[in-house]
Image (cartoon, helix red, strand yellow):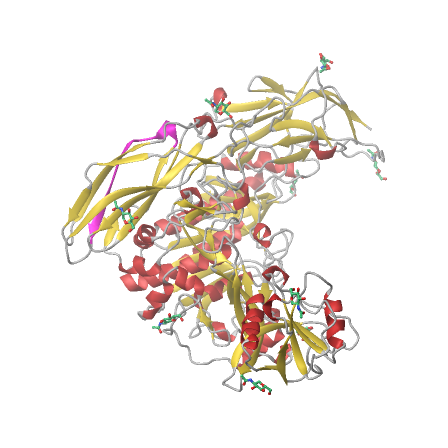
């Protein structure tokens, strides 16, 4: 599995779980309540206890922007807890209630890390003078104009960024080496302690956010403010004051009540920007953590959050809390290069000044002490297939040379080695033809004392020098004594384009997500010292801190820290990137659902003088479409500006795969449609005197030739080309068709909701009237030939409410209630579920209900109902209902 797919936790999806319609991401029986008024939760607890409900307090959430608490009802089954939830919601003190969710930070699996030597070199270079205005050639900075802004001396000085992550190894010399007042990482907190691994553990907070075991937060921190002498790069805003709110242990486990605490603490302790690189795939903007984050942003502090690495799922997969209305959701662009951390060495051409290069040691280890070799090239130049054939008679004695040879695709490396040994050779330096093969080399041929490998580019560079007759000597040290060396390799055909793994919006409320993108695909940054000191990691996790740093830089340059103001200038100046579907790049920009406003351009954002009053337009779906729009633009400059108004259409994509029944969500790359919206401006140009504001009106005609059943999502950019040389662009997005009328559940053949069994391969549907044999709950049955009913639910789109009812086919001893015309004995355990993503899942049923009741033997159907998007719970026609085939239940 590619790292990009596991880098971001895919929680919040249904999990397969025997016995319950259970959501593995929920801590059972645990809730977050928001309270009315100024009271704490004690009166609520008293009332619950008076009703014989045992309450374990979890967290005080007593903040300026969120007053509530979290707790767990401790002596009830999961199913009883559901009933209690409704009881709590009915209490006068309670404004709202949400389940406590588990969130998992991924254990990073770096593409490349430093070795022990890197840490040693880092330690040796500790506390060198910080230099922050040097010529910045770090590619993520060049891609985002951070280098240009840094050249003006903008370093984020005086601005506080609060990072919510796994902690940080602040002992790293590139991160300042210390924690607390006066240090570069000067504030923050550990909300969990190191041993917190599951919901059965108590978090044990302490004031020290040190992480020496997880790594994610140390990498994120370095992207913001590292100053690495030994690898010659800095974070984007090296002079910011950083706060680290550590929300997980080494295991990366945390919960949304802890995250809400961390966000609010970061806010109340004066952070100007909050950066967070975790979330859970939800698709909905309305969720407690997203809402808490959004309130902080509405209070003026930028909240910058990763949108997720579920790009493969296609559209409508925004993670929470990036999905929050006012939260800045960040997508990822693939770096223009793929950095690799190698062992550093030096070479000299004809005795001239040495230059550095990087290599990997192989087996046998090439050296155990510093040694200088002269490099000898196989006589056939670059075209040589290597030493697959015996070497010619005039080959000199090779015993003192380091033999440079291409790793052959035509014969085993050991055959090459044997032919070198025949001429006395003992030391080999391979280079592969393809970057893909640039990995460890193992040689077992007798007589070979050492082998190493170079990148294809470095190998060819040496070949070129040697074949023009130059003499090269190389000096190698044992890797654990070498300085680290970063070589930038090719990052593939997608380099510089929006990452295929970056999650897509919009939300089910048709809010634009992501807001912008930044380089996140293969980023070099700091790592805990004991884990190599440096690492290269991919994902929106890495793009997010860069955007947070850009907020700090732009804020410093413009002299405002107002989240909305900075967001508007970054959005207006971001650079839309061309669509790349994973195999090729196209002329049109990528869909706004994938890239938002485009890749951030820090310098332009810091200097732009025309400030639009909005950062994007959502035209919503056809039901809510309003054709006439307007916004204003303020000229904050000293000269009059005329803007020429224009429109750049971007790629239109379908939500559902065309010509496939039933409706099936397209995965990446979404199918493209050749029709676009037309924008008509009230005037072609607008002239704005210095210091004035002008209103700009336009009308939108959505594309007309597309099949709206497939929910095409059209998008593009309004452009304003100013006479002052500035080009502003504002993204828009709209959905053709009705989200409300789109089925959530589809029945029938090949449907998204059907019954299978625990012994059926590939979840094939079962025939009607089969009998399932299962043990009765609480019995001591030892039956081994059990077959359980398994319900599959793959919703077409997300839903705010999903429930599954058990409906008997004939008379039962249990009381029934009416639900949408069915006589139900109750719901499956874990039902109902709220804010359900569209990813779907399977549920194995064990014969008992949400309230713990065991049903009689007999015939049943399972009735799944889901509320349509924007549907009204009270209206029967707003529910989609699918019943399974009838089946029989028998206890064995
Ligand atoms: C929960 O605990 C309380 C107090 O200990 C007790 O009265 C009540 O019956 C228990 N409820 C359940 C469902 O076990
Ligand atoms: C790094 O150091 C640790 C502990 O000293 C050791 O176990 C490990 O093998 C070393 N790794 C390398 C690559 O030298
Ligand atoms: C910065 O480095 C780049 C790339 O090496 C070079 O093209 C540019 O001229 C340098 N700029 C300055 C101001 O040194
Ligand atoms: C040089 O390389 C070419 C192409 O691999 C091969 O055909 C030829 O035999 C080689 N010549 C010598 C002298 O090794
Ligand atoms: C390389 O070394 C050889 C042998 O020492 C010498 O004959 C030759 O002139 C050198 N080549 C150059 C370009 O210095
Ligand atoms: C505005 O400038 C951009 C970039 O220079 C260009 O692609 C676009 O065509 C211009 N639009 C108008 C309306 O002139
Ligand atoms: C639109 O797409 C739906 C779903 O695939 C299909 O049933 C319908 O026939 C299509 N309509 C047209 C006019 O092609
Ligand atoms: C299933 O059984 C019911 C009643 O037992 C019967 O009416 C129905 O026709 C059966 N369905 C199938 C597909 O055999
Ligand atoms: C199951 O076994 C336990 C102990 O072996 C016994 O106490 C209990 O009564 C049994 N339950 C049933 C339903 O047979």
**Residue 299 vertical position relative to residue 771 in the rendered view, above or below:** below
Q: Position of residue 8 (x, y in %)?
A: 55, 51
- Residue 588, by quadrant, is top left
Q: Residue at x 48, y 66 (%)?
A: 222
- Any part of residue 111 in sight: yes
Q: Position of residue 838 (x, y in %)?
A: 54, 36
Q: Position of residue 428 (x, y in %)?
A: 68, 75
444 left or right of 639 in image = right
307 left or right of 776 in image = left
Figure quadrant of the C terminus: top right
- Any part of residue 269 in sight: no
**Residue 462 vertical position relative to residue 703 in the rendered view, above or below:** below
Q: Position of residue 809 (x, y in %)?
A: 69, 17
> From which residue to which does the magenta span run?
621-635
In this rendering, the count of numbered labels is 0
Q: Residue at x 44, y 26 (%)?
A: 707
**Identity of the residue furthest to the front in this view:** 393
Q: Which quadrant contains ligand 1?
A: top right
Q: Residue at x 66, y 76 (%)?
A: 403
In the image, residue 639 lies in the stretch drawn in magenta: no
> Residue 12 versus residue 625: which sits nearer the camera?
625
> Residue 127 versus residue 815: which sits nearer the camera?
127
> Residue 466 versus residue 206: which sits nearer the camera?
466
Q: Residue at x 49, y 85 (%)?
A: 353
**Residue 709 vertical position relative to residue 495 in the rendered view, above or below:** above
């Amino acid at each position: 599995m590619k790292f990009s797919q596991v880098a971001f936790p895919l929680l919040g999806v249904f999990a397969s779980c025997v016995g319950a319609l259970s959501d593995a991401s929920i801590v059972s029986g645990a809730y977050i309540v928001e309270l009315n008024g100024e009271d704490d939760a004690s009166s609520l607890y008293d009332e619950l206890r008076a009703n014989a409900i045992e309450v374990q307090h979890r967290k005080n959430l007593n903040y300026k922007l969120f007053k509530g608490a979290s707790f767990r009802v401790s002596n009830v089954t999961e199913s009883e807890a559901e009933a209690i939830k409704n009881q709590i919601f009915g209490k006068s003190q309670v404004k709202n209630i949400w389940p406590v969710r588990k969130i998992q930070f991924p254990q990073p699996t770096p593409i490349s890390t430093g070795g022990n030597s890197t840490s040693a070199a880092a330690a040796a270079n500790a506390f060198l003078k910080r230099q922050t205005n040097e010529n910045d050639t770090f590619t993520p900075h060049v891609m985002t104009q951070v280098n240009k802004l840094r050249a003006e001396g903008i370093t984020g000085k005086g601005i506080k960024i609060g990072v919510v992550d796994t902690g940080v190894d602040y002992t790293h010399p590139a991160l300042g080496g210390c924690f607390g007042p006066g240090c570069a990482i000067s504030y923050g907190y550990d909300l969990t302690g190191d041993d917190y691994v599951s919901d059965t553990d108590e978090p044990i907070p302490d004031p020290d956010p040190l992480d020496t075991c997880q790594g994610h937060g140390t990498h994120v921190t370095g992207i913001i403010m590292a100053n690495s002498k030994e690898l010659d790069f800095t974070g984007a805003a090296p002079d910011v004051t950083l706060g680290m709110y550590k929300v997980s242990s080494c295991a990366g486990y945390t919960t949304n009540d802890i995250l809400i605490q961390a966000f609010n603490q970061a806010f109340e302790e004066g952070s100007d920007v909050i950066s967070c690189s975790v979330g859970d795939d939800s698709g909905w903007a309305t969720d407690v953590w997203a809402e808490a984050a959004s309130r902080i942003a509405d209070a003026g502090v930028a909240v910058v959050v990763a949108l997720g690495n579920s790009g493969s799922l296609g559209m409508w997969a925004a993670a929470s809390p990036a999905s929050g209305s006012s939260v800045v959701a960040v997508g990822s662009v693939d770096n223009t290069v793929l950095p690799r951390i190698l062992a550093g060495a030096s070479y000299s051409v004809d005795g001239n000044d040495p230059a550095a290069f990087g290599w990997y040691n192989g087996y046998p280890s090439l050296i155990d002490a510093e040694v200088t070799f002269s490099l000898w090239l196989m006589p056939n130049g670059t075209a040589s297939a290597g030493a697959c054939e015996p070497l010619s008679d005039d080959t000199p004695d090779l015993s003192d040379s380091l033999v440079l040879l291409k790793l052959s695709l035509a014969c085993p490396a050991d055959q090459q080695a044997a032919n070198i040994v025949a001429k006395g050779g003992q030391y080999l330096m391979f280079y592969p033809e393809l970057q893909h093969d640039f990995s460890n080399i193992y040689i077992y041929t007798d007589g070979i004392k050492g082998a190493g490998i170079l990148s294809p580019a470095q190998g060819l560079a040496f070949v070129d020098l040697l074949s023009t007759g130059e003499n090269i000597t190389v000096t190698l040290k044992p890797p654990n004594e070498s300085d680290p060396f970063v070589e930038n390799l090719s990052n593939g055909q997608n380099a510089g384009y929006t990452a295929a793994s970056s999650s897509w919006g919009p939300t089910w409320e048709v809010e634009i997500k992501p807001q912008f993108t930044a380089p996140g695909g293969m980023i070099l940054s700091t790592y805990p010292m004991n884990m190599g000191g440096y690492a290269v990691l991919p994902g929106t996790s890495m793009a997010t801190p860069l955007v947070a740093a850009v907020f700090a830089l732009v804020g410093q340059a413009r002299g405002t820290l107002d989240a909305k103001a900075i967001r508007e200038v970054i959005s207006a100046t971001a650079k839309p990137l061309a669509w790349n579907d994973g195999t090729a790049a196209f002329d049109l920009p990528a869909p706004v659902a994938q890239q938002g406003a485009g890749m951030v351009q820090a310098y332009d954002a810091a200097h732009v003088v025309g400030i639009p009053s909005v950062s994007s337009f959502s035209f919503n779906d056809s039901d809510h479409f309003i054709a006439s729009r307007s916004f204003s633009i303020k000229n904050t400059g000293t000269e009059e500006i005329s803007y020429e108004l224009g429109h750049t259409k971007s790629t239109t994509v379908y939500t559902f795969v065309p010509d496939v029944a039933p409706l099936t969500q397209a995965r990446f790359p979404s199918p493209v449609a050749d029709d676009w919206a037309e924008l008509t401006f009230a005037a072609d140009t607008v002239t704005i005197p210095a210091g004035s504001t002008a209103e700009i009106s336009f009308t939108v005609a959505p594309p007309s030739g597309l099949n709206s059943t497939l929910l095409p999502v059209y998008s593009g950019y309004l452009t304003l080309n100013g006479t002052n040389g500035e080009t502003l662009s504002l993204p828009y997005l709209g959905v053709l068709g009705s989200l409300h009328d789109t089925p959530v559940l589809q029945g029938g053949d090949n449907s998204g909701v059907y019954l299978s069994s625990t012994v059926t391969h590939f979840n094939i549907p079962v025939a009607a009237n089969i009998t399932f044999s299962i043990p009765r709950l609480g019995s001591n049955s030892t039956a081994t030939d059990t077959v359980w009913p398994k319900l599959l639910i793959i919703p077409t789109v997300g839903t705010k409410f999903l429930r599954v009812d058990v409906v008997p086919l004939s008379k039962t001893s249990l009381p029934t209630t009416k639900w949408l015309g069915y006589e139900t004995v109750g719901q499956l355990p874990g039902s109902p579920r709220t804010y359900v993503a569209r990813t779907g899942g399977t549920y194995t049923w064990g014969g008992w209900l949400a309230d713990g009741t065991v049903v009689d033997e007999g015939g049943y159907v399972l009735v799944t109902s889901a509320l349509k998007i924007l549907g009204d719970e009270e209206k029967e026609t707003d529910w989609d209902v699918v019943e399974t085939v009838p089946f029989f239940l028998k206890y064995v």
